[in-house]
Image (spheres, helix red, strand yellow):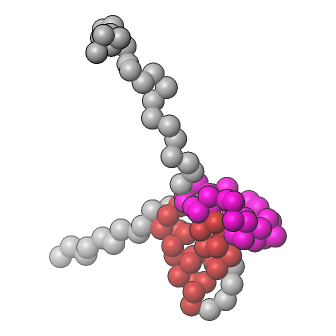
Amino acid sequence: MANLRPLKAGRSGNPAGRPCAGASLREWLNVMAQWPVRRVRYAASYRRNPAVKRAAAKLLLTACGRGPEAGEAVDRIFDRTCGRVVQQRCGR
């Protein structure tokens, strides 16, 4: 307690702010959309990548495939990058 001093008025105890938690899924999807497929495949398989980066890569690879999983993956990508579509009610 002897070495504690009160902060001056208008000063913060943490001037740098809270550290960044890392890129979000939306940010990785936007970045990886510009990458070639081989680079996305590598990002999905490289274990040292953060989990969110690997998840974004796997989601993009699924969307590039065929079948119902691809359509669902595309829907998820649009939901996360553009926002969910809001349905409007018909007024009578």
Instruction: List x then y, in percent, for residue 27.
Output: 58, 54
Viewer-nearest residue: 48 or 18: 48
Q: Main secondary structure of the magenta part?
A: helix
Q: Quadrant of the N terminus?
A: top left
Q: Quadrant of residue 6?
A: top left
Q: In the displayed structure, would residue 56 be above or below residue 62?
A: above
Instruction: List x then y, in percent, for residue 18.
Output: 45, 35
Residue at horizontal 77%, vertical 68%?
42
From where the camera sits, is residue 29 visible? no
Q: In the displayed structure, would residue 83 be above or below residue 92?
A: above
Highlighted range, magenta? 25-53
Q: Quadrant of residue 68?
A: bottom right
Q: Quadrant of the C terminus?
A: bottom left
Numbered disc total: 0
Does the magenta-highlighted stretch encompass residue 59? Answer: no
Q: In the displayed structure, would residue 53 be above or below residue 87?
A: above
Instruction: List x then y, in percent, for residue 12.
Output: 38, 19
